[in-house]
Amino acid sequence: MYRSIADYGVIGDLHTVALVSKEGSIDYCSLPRLDSPTLFAALLDDEKGGFFSLQPSGPFSSHQEYIANTNILSCRFTTDTAEALLYDFMPVQQPGALRGTQQRIHRCLRVVRGDMAFTLTLMARPDFARVVPEITPAGENRYAIRYGRKTLTLSTGCSSCSLIGIASGTLTLELRLAAPGEAHIDLLFGSVKSGEALPCPFEENVLFWQEWVNRCLGERCAYLGEFMPMVNRSLLALKLLTFQPTGAIAAAATTSLPETLGGERNWDYRFSWLRDSSFTLKALFTVGHINEADAYLRWLHLTYRKYGSRNLQIMYTLQGKARLREKKLGHLKGYRNSQPVRIGNDAHRQNQWDIYGEVMESALRLSDYAGKIDEELWPFFSNICELAIENWQKPDDGIWEVRNGPHHFVYSKVMCWVALDRGITIARRFGFDAPVERWQQERDRIRNDILEKGYNPALNSFVQKYGSTDLDASLLLLPLAGFLPVDDKRVQGTIEACRNGLMENGFLLRYRSEDGLKGEEGGFVLCNFWLVESLALSGKSDEARELLRRTLTASNHLGLFSEEFDTEKLEMLGNFPQAFSHIGYINAVSAILGKQPELQRAVTMPSWGERLRNLIPIQVTLNKRAESDPESGIETGARLKQALGRLQGAFFNAERGMINYEALKQSGEFLNYLRLAGSLNSFKPETLKSDAEKKAFWINIYNILIIHGVIEFNIQSSVLEIVNFFGRIGYTIGGIFFSPDDIEHGILRINRPHPFFPNKPFLESDPRKAFMLEQFDPRIHFALVCAASSCPPVEFYDAAIIDRQLDMAARSFINRQGMEIDRELNTLRLSPVFDWYSGDFGRTRREIILSLLPWVGEEKKGWIEEHLSSLHVRYLPYNWNLNSSLQQH
C-alpha cells in the first residue's frame, strides 16, 4: 500500500538520503550517492520496490518529529501497554574521520514504558528493484546482503532478537524489549569484520546538526523571529540535498514522484540545475550560511571550467558529469500507478536561454558578497554574455522545460537581458576587458523588444510567450531580476493578472497553456513564494504574510515541502523534499523581513563624545592583546582577511546595497576576529624573508586595518570625517604600532615621504625600517584599499601568486577608474594617484603613461602609443565617499 508523500521524513549523511515513513518504514533510499540506483523504492512500486521497516508487531499509533534543529527523526510508538522511541539517522562523516568510513543507516530503538515486540523486515531491492539479493547469516545478530560485487550488512545490537525467516531476498526478525531496554540496528553499505563493534554516534550527530544550523553569520540571524523554526528546517533540508564531496545541491531527493497522479509528468530530479544557482546563493547568503555558499560556488566554478560556456548544460550530476540520458523503467508501477518511472533527464539536451541570466546573476551575487570575481573566470562570463546576444532572438524550451517547444518565452529573453546587465556591472566594477558599449546597446535592444512584444496592454500584463495571451508565474520574477521597478504599472498589472488568472484555491499554477504533456498538475509551491516576494517588495506586507501562511499548509508535519500541492485533495505532488520550494520559502521570508523596521533602521548618528573623538587625532590601537589570543604566524594576515571578508559578505544587505557595520560590530564572529587580530601582538615581522611574503602580508594588514577603522569609528560617508584617519589607527604587531601610513609609506614605499608632507615616515633609528621591502613595486598602489570610491577592490593577497594578483589589481584599477580617454580632445584623464605619487611611476608624464600600458587593453594601448607625443594629461576628481568595495565589497 502506498503512503502519502506527506507521511515521510528525510534523513541523510551529505552523500545520500533516505525517506522514512511515520510508521518506521524506509521506503526510498539510494546508495552510495543520492543519484545512485535505489536500494529501497517502495514509493515507486509498493510490491517489489523494496523497504526496510521496524515497527511494533501489534496494533500501534505513531507520532514522528525531528529532534529540534537536527536531521534526526524521532518516531514515538504507542500501544495499549507500552511506549517506545525510534531514532533514525545516517551518521555524517566528521572532518578528520578515517577515509573509507562506511555509510550506514542507524536505527536506535528504546522502550520507555512497558515491554514491546517489534518486527524488522528488510526487503532490499538494489538497482531500481531489478535485483533480488542473497541474504545469509554473518555472525551473531548480523546478516550479509549480497548482490553482484556489492555487500550490505545488517547488524542488530539486541540480546533478544530472533530470526523469523529469510525468503525470496527478504529478511524478517523479531525483537522484544522491556523498558528501559534498547537496540541498535545498523544497515551498512559494505561488510563488517567479525567481532567489530558498531558504536551509536547519536550524541555526536545531534551536536553536528545543531551546531551547523546555528552557524548563522549575518544581520538576519537575530531577526528571524517567528520564522526561525521553518527557516532552520528549510536549511536542514537543503543541507541534506547537498553532495558534500562537490558542494552540488540536488533539486530533490527522489525520482518520478508524479506531478499528476496516474499521469506521465514524472521526472528525475536527483541532479543539480544551474538555474537554481542564483536563487540558492541568495537564500544561503541571506541566512548567513557562508560555508555552503562557498562550496556551491566552487562546484559551479569547476563546472564552468570543465565544460566552458558554449557547451554548458542546464543541469549536471552531483559529481559534475554531463551524461543524464533519460530511461523509462517499465518494470516499476510508479507511485500509485503513475507511469513511467524515469531515471536520467532528457531536459539536459534542451535550449533554455534563461540560464545565461542565472549564471551571470550568480556571478554578480558572488561579487556583492565576496568582493571579487576570479579573473580567470571572466572569459567564461564574457562568453556567456556573447551567447545571450547570439541566442536571445531564437525560441527555446523555457524555464519549465516544456516538451512542445521551442517558443519565444518572455522570461528567457528577460534573463538574456539580465546576463548583459550583470555582465556590464561586473566589467565596470572590476575593470575587466569587455565591449561594454556594445553590450549596453544589445541590452537596450532586448528590453525594447520585450516591452513591445512581451507585454499585452489589453491584459495590462506581460505574457508567457510572444504572440500569446497566456500568463506564466515566471513573470513574477521580472521585478526581482530588476528588469523593471516593482512599482511600474506593468509589473503591478502582471502581479495582479497572475493572482487572478493562475490562482486556484490559494496556490498558483505555473501556467495554463499546453506544454506537450498529458494531464494536469497541482499548485506550484515555489510560485507562491515568488508571489510572496513580489507582494512584499510592493509594500503589501500584510498580503505577503497571509499568502506565506497559506502556503505553509502545503508543508507536512515536519515542515518539508514537495514540488506541488493538490489543492482539492490537499496532498503533496512531485518529488520530495524539493530544494526549490525550500529556497523559495527562505527568500520569501527574507523579502518580508527586509521591510521590517529593525532591518530598515535609520543610520545611527554619532554621539557628542564620538564626534569629539573623531576630531581629536589621538592614536587608536585596534588590536589590544588578550590572554586568550591564538598563536600568530605568517598566515595570520591571510586568516584575518578571510575572516573579515566573510563578515562583510554575511552582513551585506542586498536590499540596501550596503554592509550593516553596526550589526557586524556586535556579532560574535567579530569578537573572534578581534581575538585573532590581537595575536598580531606576538607576530615577529622579521620572519617575513622575501619581498613576496612582505608585500602579501603588509597589503593584507593595511586593507583589513582600513576596514576595521571604518567599523571602529562608525564612518557613514567618508574617512575624511576622522581627523588623520590614516595616521592614527593601527595594529600593534610584534610589540610595535603600525598605522596605515606607516605600512604604505614606510614599509611598502620603502620610507618615501607622504605626497603631502616632506618628511620620511621612519627616522634612521626606527626599528620598523628592518621590515621594509628590498625593491619598490609601484603596483602596491593598485592593491591598497583606502575606503574611498576611487580605491581598488578589496582582495586577499597570497605570497605564492602575488605577482599575478598585483597585475590583476593594476588592470582592474586602470580599466575601472584609473584612466579615461577623450579621443576628441586628444586627452588622457588619469586618477590623481598618478599625480600624487608621480615619482613612483616615472620622472616625466611620458614615463608615467608608458608605465601604465602593460595593463591597458590592446586597442586602447595602440591608440595611446600612436598619440603619445601629442596627448594632453588631465587628472580625474578623487571620490572620498565610502567606497563600493566596502559597501558592496
Image (cartoon, grey):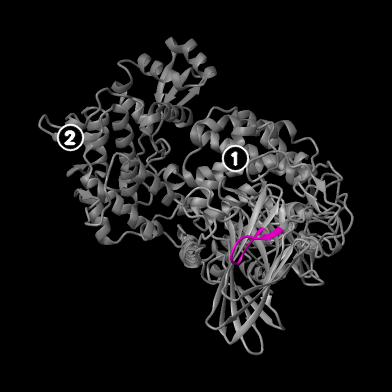
Q: Nearer the viewer, mark 1 or mark 2?
A: 2
> Is residue 191 left or right of 872 when viewed as pictured?
right
Q: Earlier in the sequence, mark 1 or mark 2?
A: 1
At horizontal 56% and vertical 74% (from top left) the residue drawn is 159
Q: Which amino acid does label 1 sit on?
A: Arg
Q: Is residue 374 left or right of residue 560?
A: left
Residue 756 visible somewhere in the drawing: no
Q: Is residue 805 left or right of residue 168?
A: left
Residue 98 seen anywhere in this rendered image of the structure: yes
How packed mark 2 is, by other alpha carbons closer than 10 Å (few <14, some 14-19, many 20 or more), is many
Q: In which quarter of the image is the C terminus?
A: top left
In the image, 580 versus 876, the foreground residue is 580
Q: Where in the figure is residue 836, as x and y percent of width and height?
A: 31, 28
Front residue of 887/645: it is 645
- Which stretch is magenta? 135-144
Could you tell me how far apart the alpha carbons at marks 1 and 2 are, in whole angstroms? 45 Å
Residue 422, given in percent of the width and then of the height, sits at 59, 40
**Image quadrant where residue 525 sits:** bottom right
- Residue tagged by mark 1? 422
Q: Residue placed at 55% from the left, 76% from the top?
A: 182
Q: Is 80 included in the stretch rendered in magenta? A: no
Residue 733: which disc? none
- What residue is shown with label 2? 768
Q: In this view, does 106 lie to the left or right of 866?
A: right
Looking at numbered disc 2 in the image, what kind of residue is underneath it?
Arg
* Category of crowding for the residue at label 1, using alpha-carbon neighbours closer than 10 angstroms: few (below 14), some (14–19), many (at least 20): many
266 up-or-down from 432: above or below: below
Residue 418, placed above or below residue 609? above
Question: Residue 654's spot in the image, x, y percent?
Answer: 53, 52
